Amino acid sequence: MRCQLGQEVGYSIRFEDVTSAATKIKFLTDGLLLREALVDPLLSRYSVVMVDEAHERSLSSDVLLGVLKKIKKRRPELRIVVSSATLNAEDFLRFFSNREDEDHTDGSSSEGSIISIEGRAFPVDIHYLSEPCEDYLERAVKTIFDIHTSEPEGDILIFLTGREEIETAIEMIADRLPSLPQNSNQLLPYPLYAGLPVEQQMYVFEPTPEGTRKVICATNIAEASVTIDGIVFVIDCGFVKLRAYNPQTGIETLTATPVSKASATQRAGRAGRTKPGKCYRLYTEAAHGSLEEATVPEIQRSNLAPTILQLKALGIDNIARFDFLTPPPAELIIRALELLYSLGALDTYAKLTSPLGTRMAELALEPMLAKCLLSAPDFGCLSEMLTIAAMTSLQGNVWFSHDEKRKEETSRRKFAVEEGDHLTLLNVYHAFVTKGKKDAKWCQQHYLNFKSMTRAVSIRNQLRRYLERFGMNVSESLASGNDVLKAGGRPVAESIRRCLTSGYFAHAARMMPDGTFRTVDGGTVLHAHPSSLMFNRKADWVIFTEVMETGDKIFVRDVTKIERGWLVEYAPEYYRLRTQLA
DNA sequence: ACGCTACCC
């Protein structure tokens, strides 16, 4: 539209609003639009809402579609445009159509119509293995070299599951480079995953130098989020890391899972953007035949406590009757309702409480953490909990690791606080803003991730603004973990631990003589993550705010010592109903 | 003795 960004056309994401009174077209994330619906339930500012990439079925886009359908009943003039891969178009049309029994095979209904846009893709030849392979990394590297020595020019994109695999693959490629004939074209391997610093991500977009071939080892980021020109060959390992949630244990995991057929098709399509291409699937055709048609939507495999809290805040009281594109399993809903009730966000009629429940829904924090923050004034540690909330809601590591593990350890010990990881994080943040003066160099010296620390400052500021809007008085004590202890401040440290217990009582565990933990019901074995202060240390009862399953072990990472009696004190019903404390 | 896939408030 040839206007200045932020004028007629603008965008908005968390921490960044590039719009103005003149803005007519606004690009924003689905999460932010849902947030706008909290204050403007009919989204009355908008006459058209377009939901892009709806076929990806992310948690927030599914929720948004349900909310839009509800709004449409009150605002018939609202236009809704859903963009999706062709396969799913009918599902969306059926969803928005009032009459479930309508026949949409002609692409129309009383509610809308399907408009198709032809992709301009070139054909892609699919190759399967004739026998299953034992080690797909090895097989992938072999395939790369086979392509390189026998195929004409064109870059290679290989789909792997995560950072570690990508780094291994790149080492393996580098190791084999000397085996190429002297006069042969070179191979340039590049990693690509979301956790990679942006500068390093940009390499994959640079034009391939004459006489070389790029090999991009990527995660799922290259399946839909990032498009790279010049790819002619795709190698697909057939796996993706997906979130899974176990409602029995309440533990979310990240597990390598076979891809769906839709996903495999999308990956193959990455080879045919500029000319006809080839896709090598590192599994057999029979294995492909037994893959699921589509990936299970996120809403059916996630912890739904945040989602249900959000729906309640949007005025959707009857979750069972809410129009989900695909309803989540009842067990997930029940588990979420139970937790929200025990946190005090819902009353016995499953209605949102006020002010606790409504405020929890407004804070951009997971419910247990939101509860801690909102109950912090009762414990006299609001300023400290603000910092802890910001630090624990960071994704990724606060510590800069890589190869210098020992130095990282030494640095970590400098900030360590006996009571656990949360007070240690408080310490780190405090040092960053005072001694460190929010400086990148200082972070480097202490093996801290500067980007994460800067983000913690932004999150903390945003949370503080929310609290002030709630009319809460945030007097900044700027106490760090060590400071509260040194200043004879055990009472403050204890308040913080009690406060954490008031939100995380459902994440309690007890240390056994062998150093592992048991959940309260005794059913789950947890291990202290080696990056936790509790690794190789003695403790009795603890709460944890971060849990992850890798391989065959479940690790807890942000861990703080508590006292058994506090659990019953802050969650009497939760523990009375569940089990007797051992 | 271990790391966060992707997205995001």
Image (tube, coloured by chain):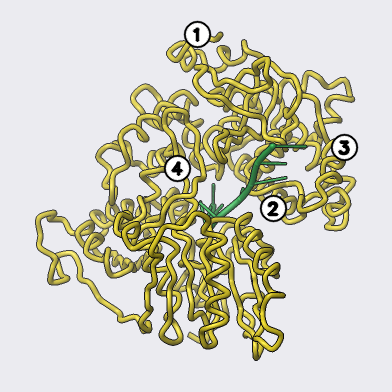
Chain colours: A yellow, B green
The verdict on a common chain for dots 2 and 3 is yes
Residue highlighted by disc 2: A455
Residue highlighted by disc 1: A580
Q: How crowded is mark 1: few (under 14 residues within 10 Å), some or many (20 or more)?
A: few
Q: Which kind of residue does numbered mark 3 sit on?
A: Lys
| Mark toward the start of the polypeptide (4 vs 3) | 4
Q: Distance between the residues labelled 2 and 3?
A: 22 Å
Protein chain holding label 2: A
Q: In this view, does A305 lie to the left or right of A452?
A: left
**Callout in the foreground (4, 3):** 4
The verdict on a common chain for dots 2 and 1 is yes
**Callout in the foreground (2, 1):** 1
The image shows residue A80 at horizontal and vertical percentages of 30, 65
Q: How crowded is mark 2: few (under 14 residues within 10 Å), some or many (20 or more)?
A: some
Q: Which kind of residue does numbered mark 2 sit on?
A: Arg
Q: How crowded is mark 3: few (under 14 residues within 10 Å), some or many (20 or more)?
A: few
Residue highlighted by disc 3: A414
